[in-house]
Image: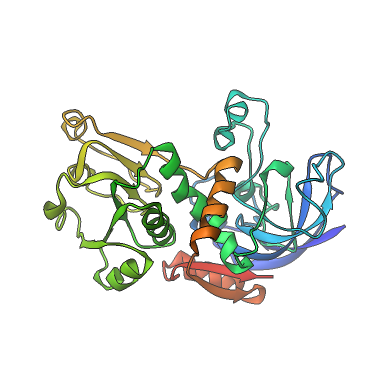
Amino acid sequence: MTIRAYAVERAGGSVQVRHYAVAPPGPLEVLVAVTHCGVCHTDIGMIDDEWGISAYPVVAGHEAIGVIEALGEAVDRTRLAVGLRVGVGATAGSCFACEWCLSGRQQLCPAKDNTAVRGNGGAFASHVRATDWRHVYPIPDAIASEYAGPLLCAGTTVFAPLLRQGVRPVDRVAVVGVGGLGHLAIQFLEKWGCHVTAISSTPDKESDARRFGAHEFVVADGAKGLEGVANSFDHIVSTVSADLPWDAYLATLRPHGTLCVLGVSDRALTIRPLSLLPGERAIVGGVTAPPAETRLMLDFAARHGIRPEVEMFPAARLDEALDHVRRGRARYRAVVEF
């Protein structure tokens, strides 16, 4: 068959409609007809070659929602069927044979299939292929398609630390950045039962932060503004891509507190050892969740009414959607309807 894709031919270029011939699904593969796809900063990074790994033409997109059109012969038919509404996220497959896959940590698989960095195989297209059916997620009826896409990247990224870092309902947690990831992190943490403080350099986001569930709001300009919350938090979830005064943020953690870094800065993370050692604090990184945790996230979001706030764009305005995200203007996730 032939798929219609929105490809970029050079770094920072505009999208061009291209048609590619694709083979029928292999034994474990699933072909999904895309109806909606979120726009993530990772897509911009690939289109603009921010990390020097892009191979053109690039078809970005990795927050896809659609309907199954074809299944490989080895796909479990008790879980997936043609016509079922599903999602394909940042990871479309993994080896299921390495130590990481066998222990349920497929997000760490060295051979995982990253949807966003495939070249011309992303989800800004009429169809997207998952290379392993176990990375395809039935979408709960309670979550509309335009909201489901961003949950498969931004949602899993901020939900996973709740499980991996042992966040408790009695914990006090700070979310740095009220943006695409941050506005979801606030919602998940509030429904988890935590006392949530939103930290932002933008004062006019306070009303939104409180609407998403934040109990407190702190305006921080660099280290200024953090003095009043010293030794306050059990966990910090940093969702911004900016370089922060990390020592000042570590000083807001209680002993044994954890700073989870989810945003990607282009500068080195610099800290003083004494910001960590006396309080036995920890710094950890985070990526999108494996399949088991992603399914838990979707169930939790459906049960508690957690939804991204989205701005919708038709496929004909994909360039506009990309530039909207590129310039940091999305409030709070852009979603393209195909």
Q: Residue furthest top?
A: 99
Q: Residue at x 16, y 29 (%)?
A: 278
Q: Position of residue 68 (x, y in %)?
A: 78, 57
Instruction: Count all numbered tags in the image, as a single digit.
Output: 0
Relative to 302, 180 lies left or right: left
Snapshot quadrant of residue 269: top left
The answer to whether residue 45 is seen in the rendering is: no
Foreground pick, 173 / 9: 173
**Is 225 drawn above or below residue 144 in the view shown?**
above
- Residue 316, quarter of picture: bottom right
Question: Quick check: 311 above or below 122?
Answer: below
Taking the spot 37% from the left edge, 47% from the top edge, the residue there is: 266
Return the x and y of residue 169 as percentages of the image width and height: 34, 47
Q: Is residue 161 above or below residue 222?
A: above
Q: Is residue 189 above or below residue 13?
A: above
- Colouring convention used in this rendered image of the protein: rainbow
Q: Residue furthest left?
A: 227
Horizontal arrangement in the rendering, residue 25 relative to residue 191 (left or right): right
**Which quarter of the figure is the C terminus placed in?**
bottom right
Is 220 on the left-hand or right-hand side of 305? left
Residue 22 position, x and y percent, is 83, 52
Could you tell me residue 100's position as x and y percent?
57, 28
Q: Is residue 128 visible?
A: yes
Of residues 79 and 7, the one nearer the viewer is 79
Q: Quadrant of residue 37?
A: bottom right
Image quadrant occupied by the N terminus: bottom right
Q: Residue at x 35, y 70 (%)?
A: 211
